[in-house]
Amino acid sequence: MGQGRLLGKTVLVTAAAQGIGRASALACAEEGARVIATDINEALLATLAAEHAHIEVAVLDVRSQAAVEALAAQLPALDVLFNCAGMVANGSLLDCSEADWDLSFDLNVKSMFRMTRAFLPAMLDKAKANQGTVSVINMASMASSIKGFANRAAYGATKAAVIGLTKSLAADFVKEGLRANALCPGTVDTPSLRGRIASAADPIQAEKDFIARQPMGRLATVGDIAPMVVYLASDESRFMSGQTLLVDGGVTI
């Protein structure tokens, strides 16, 4: 059982149907938060809602401005917005089509712009009365401006943009009591990763290669990442803003 670290807070999580988003939604609910879990996968969202009484679900396509604005109009002011939705496009710059590049930026970066812009005014009103307790958490990556990785041209560029967006958000609104931080995981064992491994020419070797680049000798689990989301959402991090929190098993040492 949780210790009520998020009691009284309303937390919205995108891409909450599986992987890091799902684990984070459950972790926040366990700590007492009212969680609004969103995703495009209605079936998986339904199973999430059944797991915890504090979780409400809403089908949401974060690539749709109209859908994002409609949801923002329905909900009360958030204490925490966790922008978790994203994708990984594999390949070098020469492998990346313009369509892949545009999709990567739309889902990985512009969705955060849409979500934050829609929910920010009400969050700022709440932040003024509760300095440091209202926050935006953006999913970035160690594969970003922090470190370059082969075959991650589009992905790395988008996650570098996420870090830039997060720091700008933090700088613009720090005096109004809003915090913004970027979470930068290493390689996490999620359905997304398993899909990339399965699609490789040699899946067994692909998994070995992912593990081989981990100094700790294993992939991260969602259980390694969700506690960091709770920390960034909680008042324990109330004096922290504009930061990149690396949880990468030592890859960037």
Image (cartoon, helix red, strand yellow):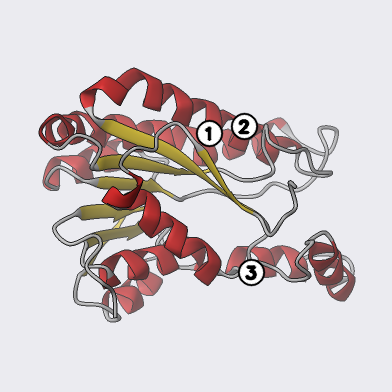
Q: Nearer the viewer, residue 228 or 136?
A: 228
The residue wearing badge 2 is 160
Looking at the rendered structure, the secondary structure element under dot 2 is helix
What amino acid type should be assigned to the residue bearing mark 1? Val
Is residue 78 shown to the viewer in this render? yes
- Crowd class of label 3 (few under 14; some 14 to 19; many from 20; radius 10 Å): some
Labels 1 & 2 near each other (Cβ < 8 A): yes
Q: CA distance from mark 3 to mark 2?
A: 22 Å
Task: Tell me the tag on residue 162.
Answer: 1
- Identify which residue is drawn at 53% across, 48% down: 86
Relative to 206, is 241 above or below? above
How many circles with numbers are drawn on the protein?
3
Q: Is residue 9 left or right of residue 174?
A: left
Labels 1 & 3 near each other (Cβ < 8 A): no
Q: Earlier in the sequence, mark 3 or mark 2?
A: 2
Task: Tell me the tag on residue 47.
Answer: none
Residue 236 at x, y = what percent?
32, 51
- Identify which residue is drawn at 37% across, 58% down: 230
The residue wearing badge 3 is 189
Quadrant of residue 5 in the image? bottom left
- Crowd class of label 1 (few under 14; some 14 to 19; many from 20; radius 10 Å): many
